[in-house]
Image (spheres, coloured by chain):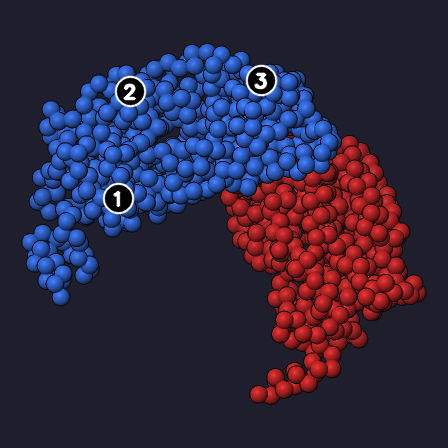
Chain colours: A blue, B red
Amino acid sequence: MFRPIIAASLLAAASPIIAQVHFSPLVDPKVAVLRDEALTGDHYAWDIVEGLTTEVGPRLAGTEAEARAREWAVKRLNAMGFANVRVEPFDMPVWVRGHESAEIIAPFPQPMVIAALGNSGSTGAEGITGDIVAFDSVDALRAAPNELVSGKIVFVDHAMPANQDGSGYGQFGAPRRQGPTVASQKGALAIVIRSIGTDRHRNPHTGVMTFSDGAKPIPAGALSNPDADQLLRILKRGQPVRMKLVLESSNLGTRQSGNVIAEVPGRDPSLTPILVGGHLDSWDQGTGAIDDGAGVAIAAAAAKRIMDAGRPLRTIRIVWFGAEEMGLFGGFDYRAKYGKQPHYALIESDFGADKIWKIDSKLGDARKAEAEAIGKALAPLGIVTGKFDEADGSDIGPMINDGLPGIGLSQDGTRYFDLHHTPDDTLDKIDPAQLRQNVAAWTTVLAVLSGGIEEPKSRKRR
Amino acid sequence: MFRPIIAASLLAAASPIIAQVHFSPLVDPKVAVLRDEALTGDHYAWDIVEGLTTEVGPRLAGTEAEARAREWAVKRLNAMGFANVRVEPFDMPVWVRGHESAEIIAPFPQPMVIAALGNSGSTGAEGITGDIVAFDSVDALRAAPNELVSGKIVFVDHAMPANQDGSGYGQFGAPRRQGPTVASQKGALAIVIRSIGTDRHRNPHTGVMTFSDGAKPIPAGALSNPDADQLLRILKRGQPVRMKLVLESSNLGTRQSGNVIAEVPGRDPSLTPILVGGHLDSWDQGTGAIDDGAGVAIAAAAAKRIMDAGRPLRTIRIVWFGAEEMGLFGGFDYRAKYGKQPHYALIESDFGADKIWKIDSKLGDARKAEAEAIGKALAPLGIVTGKFDEADGSDIGPMINDGLPGIGLSQDGTRYFDLHHTPDDTLDKIDPAQLRQNVAAWTTVLAVLSGGIEEPKSRKRR
């Protein structure tokens, strides 16, 4: 009998009741209402990701398509009523895909499905032909004598699992990140890897890689998972396997990309701003719905919901980063311009649109109570409170490492790497209900961090 | 108490007991044992479909790849110990795919994923560009005035559902089967359809179509479902939509295909044979695992299991039909050569490798008891007995219509049209346990139809 009595007495003072369900007295009822309205009613995020993926589509960093995405973004953010909408341009080296194909020549002639990795060398239109030498991991490739690899087409396999926290991507992404450099250093003609992905479709997963340690660029591509399975079956027959590879690609030199920035001005401009972001660029084969149309949509939708509710004490700064996929160019540009200035918190959404299941934060010991309060406010969304000394995000990662405070809202990544960097990253993969849960979580976090929202007079009068 | 007593008394006379589970006294215990051994132990079917899809891969009708498939088949069927293994060649017109791409030019430039339909006209390498005129069905296209369609690229949509019995394919396949002819007759420049499929991947579904009623061939392609969704979203913005289409394809003239035939000779050659089959050719983009590597594998595996058990009274004739996909050429060739001869039953597997859920038969009124006995023997596999006046199969369909007796074992088609005629038709889509259930069902049917299996002396002596 104890708890109901306490609850009732507190509720009488502060907490609203919706249809006989009592809110936790530990959560500001205004925050709870904003949260629950977003969960059931948000349409801003869907409208943004639907619009961007439909009206722009793929938007590879530094290309004309990414420039159209910036124009679209400026128009949309202005139309939504944000302040200080602007593009902050920066330069970057631009790589683009050309025609690509792979074919087993012997012993069992058949086509395979492949996609060049970002920054791959080009085979030229005529392609190259070579014998396959296969490794189950980059470690195995690294251990191989150069003469085994030299003049061959290297194949590197892996066994990436689908995990909720996406943790397979780090370890099992090595064939893409390190494989091309190691293969090049050992004199390989080219490298093909099993896609860094967890699906079973003929959709190869691209992604960026960089030839480091002076390694000369060689053609580098990813086979779809069913093709990698097929290649392994063919290899297991024990006969030499020859492949023809056409991976045409071009380096276009230095071109312009840019970040798109917009703000909800705070009532006290002297206070440090909250940065909410995602990245505007996408890979070229899908329409960048989960990576990262959803992210820019969630960030802007949450900021818009705060703006609709009134004026926050602190400024909320929306940053739609450019050129994340090719190497965090937008994040580094923002850091160069603003990274020395204090921020109240950095938050980025770049892991799809499935439900958020965990919040981590790194706001510093002095703000532990604030971090805990955010956790309490998120709990009704099914979000567990994780660590207080950890936060991440791709573009914001370097600034968090520099010491700026950050929050990490972790989406469920179980099916993220089925779609990531493939032609299959399209709007239909977004579940509108889970997208709203994301917006609800972000709105909640912003509502707490904002320092209080002053309702507009028109709203008060109602 | 009644049923157990009856069961016990019958079992004492006839039925074997496996680990305390009593078999139905209505089923020949030898048949039950063959069925259950196949269910848990068959490896023949997997070995065939794994071998064919790996060592040959795609095998488009009339091409060099299909010829390699016939060589592979003869070798494999001989190695399995079948008698009278032979190729029966026939001629056919051959169509092959070339380079293909689709692109929205305006208002929102972006690439789309497309595949030419079989017998599509060619755009030539330079492609064609036209405005899209969209219809929700072939009925809507048919009702449109010619001037609305003339000179345009027609898009035809549909809403095919995924059904266990695959029934959506008939009605909702009209855009592929009839759309190109209707569009051509109305003066369309080309036609693109929503893929006749139920998945949400960027894998378009090809399939054959024929320009009839004197319609001149025009380029005809299928967009993947996510691309069709995207095109609709773009169209709904209300601006004119222009598409560039490259569908290069070629007619190679008359080439050779063929059926591969093998037999388990019956003890009494004067009796009519049982035909079991599937088709050896496949579409060119996947490796033809579910369509129809699984089918030829199931048919041959069941025949092999009967042969392993002893000599059937009747001959079992395995037919791996050629060139099914391009128009049942193999089925018509067999019909021309053997269709006037009596057959004891025709059975074909051509609907993937998911579990069989239903048996229909058309053996004639005089054989109703036999048909019922087959149903009883299949029931423990979870197979319902359907109709007694119906059977089907693609290659055998015309002969069943002619009046030859047939049996139809229906596979679960719920996910069949996710994969059908796409690059995604690969080995990993076959569930080995469900494949074994197919073999168990077919072995059961053959065991009953065979007229009794005489065990070899070596087996009897054990």
Q: Quadrant of residue B205?
A: top right
| Residue at the (82%, 47%) spot, across then down | B79
Q: Chain of mark 3?
A: A
SS for callout 3: loop
Q: Chain of mark 2?
A: A
Task: Give the mark, 2 or 3, whose residue is nearer the N terminus.
Answer: 3
Q: Are marks 1 and 3 in contact (CB under 8 Å)?
A: no
- Residue at which label 1 appears: A385
| Label placed on residue B286 | none
- Mark 2 and mark 3, same subunit? yes
Q: How many marks?
A: 3
How far across and how far down the image is residue B76, in percent? 80, 45
Q: Amino acid at mark 3?
A: Lys
Task: Give the mark, 2 or 1, whose residue is nearer the N terminus.
Answer: 2
- Residue at which label 2 appears: A334
Density class for disc 1 (Cα within 10 Å; few <14, some 14-19, many ≥20) is some
Q: Which is more foreground, mark 2 or mark 3?
A: 3
Q: Is residue A273 above or below residue B258?
A: above
- Mark 1 and mark 3, same subunit? yes
- Residue at which label 3 appears: A186
Density class for disc 3 (Cα within 10 Å; few <14, some 14-19, many ≥20) is many
SS for callout 1: strand
SS for callout 2: helix
How far across and how far down the image is residue B167, in percent? 60, 57
| Residue at the (68%, 58%) spot, across then down | B41
Q: Quadrant of residue B213?
A: top right
